[in-house]
Image (cartoon, rainbow, N blue to C red):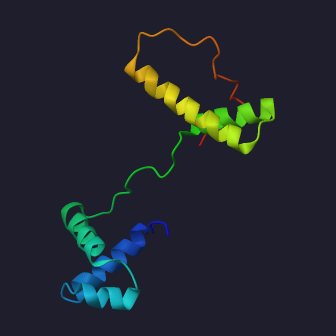
Amino acid sequence: MGRKYYTSEEKLAAVKLYIKYDFSPSAVIYELGYPSRNRLYSWYKEYKETGKFTIKGNHTKYTAEQRKAAVQYYLEHGRTAPSGAFLLVTIQLSAFLLTLLPNSRTPKRSLNHNLSAFPTG
């Protein structure tokens, strides 16, 4: 089973109940059915320190530009979905290697395709 992500509203509801019930995590978990005791403690601590909840990380593995390049490649070459996934990994690895070796020469074959047909965002 995957990890459950909660909205800021769900987190706030849990924290408010936690305060209302005199900092009793059991009462909050009993009423809402979520979160775990430790997660509730961390939400309360975050809310107390910042007054809001931050979104932890970007749950997207690839950037919008990388996804667009993969779609463009798929449309141009008619590859199957596994090939498109392989392309995304290749793009990500290439970008990472370029950060490590900034003075290296550019590869002969480039994955830069015309992406203007795809909307950004």
Task: Decide which of 15, 57 is in the foreground and name it.
Answer: 57
Task: Decide which of 3, 71 is in the foreground and name it.
Answer: 3
Q: Is residue 30 left or right of residue 112?
A: left
Q: Is residue 26 left or right of residue 82?
A: left
Q: Can you tell which quarter of the image residue 106 is in?
A: top right
Task: Decide which of 70, 52 is in the foreground and name it.
Answer: 70
Q: Horizontal and vertical percent for residue 48?
A: 20, 67
Q: Is residue 118 visible?
A: no
Identity of the residue drawn at 63% across and 18% down = 110
Q: Can you tell which quarter of the image residue 74 is in?
A: top right
Q: Is residue 52 left or right of residue 68?
A: left
Question: Where is 39 relative to 78, above or below?
Answer: below
Identity of the residue drawn at 41% across and 74% down = 10
Q: Horizontal and vertical percent for residue 116?
A: 70, 29
Task: Decide which of 85, 15 is in the foreground and name it.
Answer: 85
Q: Is residue 58 visible?
A: yes
Q: Is residue 22 left or right of residue 107?
A: left
